Image (cartoon, rainbow, N blue to C red):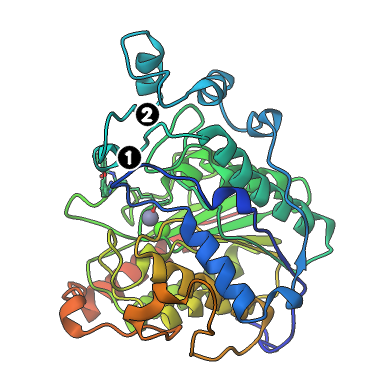
Amino acid sequence: SPSCGDDKKRRVCYYYDPGISTVDYGEGHVMVPHRVTMAHNLVAAYGMLGDMRRLRTAPATAAELADFHDEGYLALLQDLTPDGCGGDDGVGDMARARGIYAVEGKGGGRGVDNPVFDRLWDYCLRYSGGSLAAARTLGSGTADIAINWSGGMHHACRGGARGFCYVNDIVLAIRELLAHFRRVLYVDIDVHHGDGVQAAFEASNRVMTVSFHQHGGGFFPGSGAVADVGKKGPGRYCALNVPVSVGIGDEEYHRLFEPIMARVMEVFQPEAVVLQCGADSLAGDRLGELNLTTRGHAQCVSFIRSFNLPLLLLGGGGYTINHVASCWCNETAVAIGKEIPNDIPKHGFDVFYKNQEYKLHYKLETKHLHRNRNTANSIDGIRMAAMENLSKLKL
Ligand code: ZLV
Ligand code: CA
Ligand code: ZN
């Protein structure tokens, strides 16, 4: 169970690369990298930058990405430009084979998950560079918690892009952590299944992947049923999936999260933890249909933090950008172990928080919540099935 001393301070290292702030997936696309800049400005406005060590992030190099990704895919990613892959020149076909699509004209972002956009390669190097630097700092033992809110791109595959993700910075960071730690635990509270990370480590018993996600009704990506425990071999049962239905709230979520994660810690005994904090599991998200509050979401961070293991905090999804920034700012405070006021300080970006009445912890009217499709029985059933899977894990 979690040790006491939740109020104990941690050495926190924070990575933010301003180079991602103007990256644009295209008009109509729901993924807005600028939300990370909003979170950063909120963190600064609350006066938290002085509570953390900040190291300059260098963009990753192609060689570093090749530690996981296919060289042919990287070569293509590096060469793509918005005007260089639309036609029938063969580049377009090669890109499409890797999951990337050219978009023509305005509003093109509405039609494809992984568009080609300006400075795409540079964006991948920057968000991956942050996660790699964070992992190295944890490996060196000079920080207890490292944060990169621009990372967490859990769907990217070895040879292709998927679900808004081009390079899997999480896989790269975990591979770096494996050089220093015997066993690494990956926990994913993004509303979507962390399929790319699970697939990358399915054969290994040194990495356990645990994803909580909305499941059913065709919700993306569709994988991650509770019976999905990874493929046969030494890594079997080192993948754990906790699917939930539309409308789950804080209380029920934590009736799953806390007992399951406490048991995972006992049976897997990780030496380091990576927590993907996708904010699309919050109430009022444009894609997710769950009802978590910023407090319920942050409770996951503080619960994992209480185990006192080297901890890497990453971003991920999150499509109502003022909610996302509030969530990650608050979770930065949780990492530091600092209480911050609910009133959002006056700063250059405060207009973004008008419709949440300038409060960090926004409140939604019932009509904006999704009807809860989970029942006490369905929650108990999922928890018991997950515990049953955990009982089969033999290291
Ligand atoms: O939050 O899509 O449903 C981490 C993350 O987990 C799909 N994609 C794909 C699979 C077949 N469909 C069709 C393609 C749809 C293309 C356009 C959208 C356009 C506008 C608004 C929303 C979407 C959209 N796309 C909603 N859900 C999808 C998913 C991908 C979700 C990725 C989540 C990424 C960053
Ligand atoms: Ca998830
Ligand atoms: Zn997501």
Residue at the spot of label 1: 113
Callout 2 crowding tier (Cα within 10 Å): few <14, some 14–19, many ≥20:
many
Q: Quadrant of the N terminus?
A: bottom right
Residue 343 visible, this angle = yes
Q: Nearer the viewer, residue 191 or 378?
A: 191
Residue 70 appears left or right of 352? right
Does the residue tagged 1 have its C-beta within 8 Å of any atom of ligand 1? yes
Q: Is residue 100 above or below residue 179?
A: above
Q: Residues under labels 2 and 1: Cα distance?
A: 9 Å
* Residue ID at (77%, 45%): 179
Q: Is residue 60 above or below residue 372?
A: above
Per the rendering, the mark at residue 99 is 2
Q: Nearer the viewer, residue 115 or 97?
A: 115
Q: Secondary structure at mark 2?
A: loop
Looking at the image, do the residues carrying marks 2 and 1 touch, with CB atoms under 8 Å apart? yes
* Residue ID at (65%, 47%): 173
Query: Which amino acid is tagged 1?
Result: Asp
Q: Nearer the viewer, residue 390 or 296?
A: 296
